[in-house]
């Protein structure tokens, strides 16, 4: 496989490709390192991608999995989601070219299927029999579904106050669903403790985190391939732990590095909810570290008060000339409606955050009119229905022409 080792992001110490996530020397996070020299024949690499399956396994050369054969792979292939040109949204915002990467179009309707596909496949390769996770909602759906598809047991731990749609769309897969009386950071702490003595459990975002994180790179690969092997100028991405945001940066950098695309990593804009915005706050204050917060926002999928990849997200935003901004609950609701009304894409609260931050960047003049901008829509609107309740009017009529006309006659005078 192209992956060579796990490597500490802080001190560079190398480890074998096993279930391990912190450096035992400096406690820094581990990341997968690759030997891309094998990929010197760019034409051949591109042909392998284009001849691959219509899912994220077409980027096998860039993922930390053994063997080119899909024998161990999950039965729920993620990826190859639509990239839609959104001219009506662009026009509304006074921009020329805006694209929507609709990652709600995954098996369990969020981008989390990408990270779970890699983590679950690697977990099998390493001999684990049980999948587990600490989740803000979408990860729960995906881990439960992948466990079902692979015939692995699963334990899914969530904050007890999660949206009902996300709870139902998890339990249906026959997982061990555990509601923890606390917020996500409490759930994560509990899972970190549990992972210490559950030896055959692969916690996808804890002991499998280095592999999990690699799945997010495929969003960048797809954007580049779908734009005809070209780069956008700017990408707007929501931030919870900061993993997706930083790995999209890594994905573009790798494609540039091996020569599949020309140019530089796009300007990277992170999007947070004001009610849980430790990374946006650190960005604004010029800090290198994020001060943990207690989340209070309708964007529950982004409600991580102590973001593991916060410092790396800050680095990436600064290095690419981007920023990390936040929007409040009212703006999030309006963002959901704006995207729906101009593109036909109905997103969950996280997508409302992303769209509202795009709008803010457009209005403040941070985006040049001529730029090619991509927004990453990470989840499905049907999972957070409360966010749009009472945001529009409807009409109830008797089944007669008179009643129909009466309803609309009245609405004109309102
Ligand atoms: C998990 C999640 C994110 C961001 O996750 P990171 O922890 O920053 O990688 C964004 N959107 C949705 C809908 C999510 O579920
Ligand atoms: Zn280290």
Image: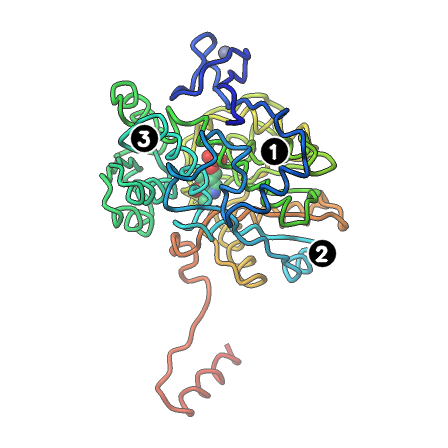
- Mark 2 and mark 1 lie on one chain; the one further toward the N terminus is 2
Identify the residue at image location x=54%, y=44%. 327
Badge 3 crowding class, 10 Å Cα cut-off, few under 14, some 14 to 19, many 20 or more, is many
Q: Which mark is drawn over residue 249?
A: 1
Please tell me which residue is depicted at 46% across the width and 88% down the height of the picture: 405
Q: Is residue 190 left or right of residue 235?
A: left
Q: Position of residue 350 (x, y in %)?
A: 48, 46
Query: Does residue 96 lie above or below 321 as drawn?
Result: below
| Residue at the disc numbered 3 | 187
* Percent of width and height locating residue 330: 50, 51
Residue 79 % position (x, y)? 49, 46
Q: Nearer the viewer, residue 199 or 57?
A: 57
Residue at label 2?
94
Helix, strand or loop for disc 3? helix
Compare marks 1 and 3 and give the one earlier in the sequence: 3
* Contact between labelled residues 3 and 1, with CB atoms less than 8 Å apart: no
Ligand 1 neighbours mark 3 (CB distance < 8 Å): no
Residue under the image location 56 percent in, 40 percent down: 271
Quarter location, residue 325: top right
Q: Residue at x 45, y 16 (%)?
A: 16
Give the alpha-carbon distance from disc 3 to disc 2, as whole Å.
Answer: 42 Å
Residue 76 seen from this side = yes
């Amino acid at each position: 496989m192209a992956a060579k080792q796990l490597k500490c992001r802080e001190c560079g110490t190398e480890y074998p490709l096993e279930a391990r996530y912190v450096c035992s020397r400096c406690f820094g996070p581990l990341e997968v390192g690759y030997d891309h020299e094998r990929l010197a024949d760019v034409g051949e690499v591109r042909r392998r991608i284009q001849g691959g399956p219509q899912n994220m396994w077409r980027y096998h050369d860039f993922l930390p999995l053994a063997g080119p054969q899909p024998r161990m792979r999950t039965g729920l292939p993620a990826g190859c989601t639509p990239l839609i040109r959104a001219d009506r949204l662009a026009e509304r915002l006074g921009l020329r070219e805006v694209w929507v990467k609709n990652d709600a179009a995954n098996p369990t309707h969020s981008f989390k299927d990408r990270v779970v596909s890699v983590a679950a496949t690697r977990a099998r390769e390493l001999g684990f029999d049980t999948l587990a996770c600490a989740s803000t909602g979408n990860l729960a759906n995906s881990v439960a579904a992948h466990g079902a598809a692979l015939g692995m047991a699963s334990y899914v731990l969530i904050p007890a106050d999660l949206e009902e749609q996300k709870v139902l769309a998890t339990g249906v897969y026959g997982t061990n669903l555990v509601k923890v009386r606390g917020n996500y950071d409490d759930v994560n702490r509990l899972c970190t403790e549990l992972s210490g003595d559950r030896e055959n459990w692969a916690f996808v975002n804890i002991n499998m985190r280095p592999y999990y994180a690699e799945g997010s790179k495929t969003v960048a690969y797809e954007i580049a391939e779908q734009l005809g092997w070209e780069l956008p100028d700017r990408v707007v991405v929501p931030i919870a732990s900061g993993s997706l945001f930083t790995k999209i940066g890594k994905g573009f950098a790798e494609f540039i590095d091996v020569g599949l695309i020309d140019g530089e990593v796009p300007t990277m804009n992170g999007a947070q909810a004001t009610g849980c915005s430790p990374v946006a706050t650190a960005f604004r204050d010029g800090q290198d570290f994020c001060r943990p917060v207690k989340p209070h926002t309708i964007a529950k999928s982004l409600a991580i008060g102590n973001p593991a990849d916060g410092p790396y997200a800050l680095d990436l935003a600064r290095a690419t000339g981007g920023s990390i901004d936040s929007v409040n609950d009212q703006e999030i609701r309006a963002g959901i409606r704006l995207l729906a009304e101009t593109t036909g894409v109905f997103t969950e609260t996280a997508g409302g955050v992303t769209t509202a931050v795009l709008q803010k960047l457009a209005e403040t003049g941070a985006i040049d009119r001529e730029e090619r901008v991509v927004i990453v829509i990470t989840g499905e609107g049907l999972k957070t229905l409360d966010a749009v309740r009472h945001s529009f009017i409807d009409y109830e009529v008797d089944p007669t022409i008179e009643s129909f006309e009466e309803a609309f006659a009245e609405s004109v005078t309102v």
